[in-house]
Image: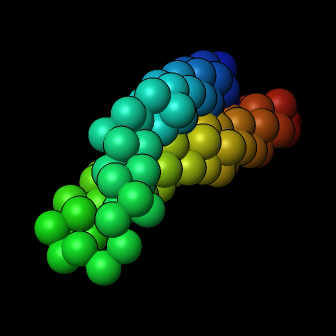
């Protein structure tokens, strides 16, 4: 059981890191956000550009939070499963 838990910890960490990097690459390539931000800066006070920017900003914030969540799942989930696996290995060795 300890080996299974440690394997799941490694897989959880790898999948979390992959998800985090995937969303981080989407954040870096978010051209719509950059375009809408530039349009808002060129046209201050225009409600149309302000609204389009807010919509693009909401999507951008979702991508940032998703990347952060992926890395947190990798770190916390992997650590938790690894710790339970280590604890289980100790209990298996007891006479």
- Residue 92 position, x and y percent, is 74, 33
Residue sitting at x 48%, y 50% = 64
- Among all residues in the image, which is located at the extreme left? 48
Name above or below for residue 40 compared with residue 26.
below
Viewer-proximal residue among 65 and 32? 32
Viewer-proximal residue among 61 and 8? 61
Horizontally, residue 72 falls left or right of residue 46, namely: right
Tell me if residue 63 can be seen: no
Q: How is the image coloured?
A: rainbow
Name above or below for residue 13 compared with residue 71.
above
Location of the C terminus (image quadrant): top right
Horizontally, residue 83 falls left or right of residue 4, namely: right
Residue sitting at x 33%, y 65% = 43
Location of the N terminus (image quadrant): top right
- Residue 51 position, x and y percent, is 20, 69
Report which quarter residue 88 is drawn in.
top right
- Residue 53 position, x and y percent, is 29, 61
Count of labels shown?
Answer: 0
Viewer-proximal residue among 93 and 45? 45
Report which quarter residue 85 is drawn in.
top right
Horizontally, residue 47 falls left or right of residue 61, namely: left
Residue sitting at x 31%, y 40% = 32
């Amino acid at each position: 059981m300890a080996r299974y838990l440690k394997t799941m910890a490694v897989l959880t960490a790898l999948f979390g890191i992959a998800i985090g990097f995937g969303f981080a690459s989407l954040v870096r390539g978010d051209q719509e956000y950059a375009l809408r931000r530039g349009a808002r800066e060129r046209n201050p006070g225009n409600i149309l550009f302000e609204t389009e920017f807010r919509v693009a900003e909401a999507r951008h914030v979702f991508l940032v939070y998703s990347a952060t969540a992926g890395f947190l799942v990798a770190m916390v989930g992997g650590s938790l499963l690894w710790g339970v696996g280590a604890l289980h290995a100790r209990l298996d060795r007891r006479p």
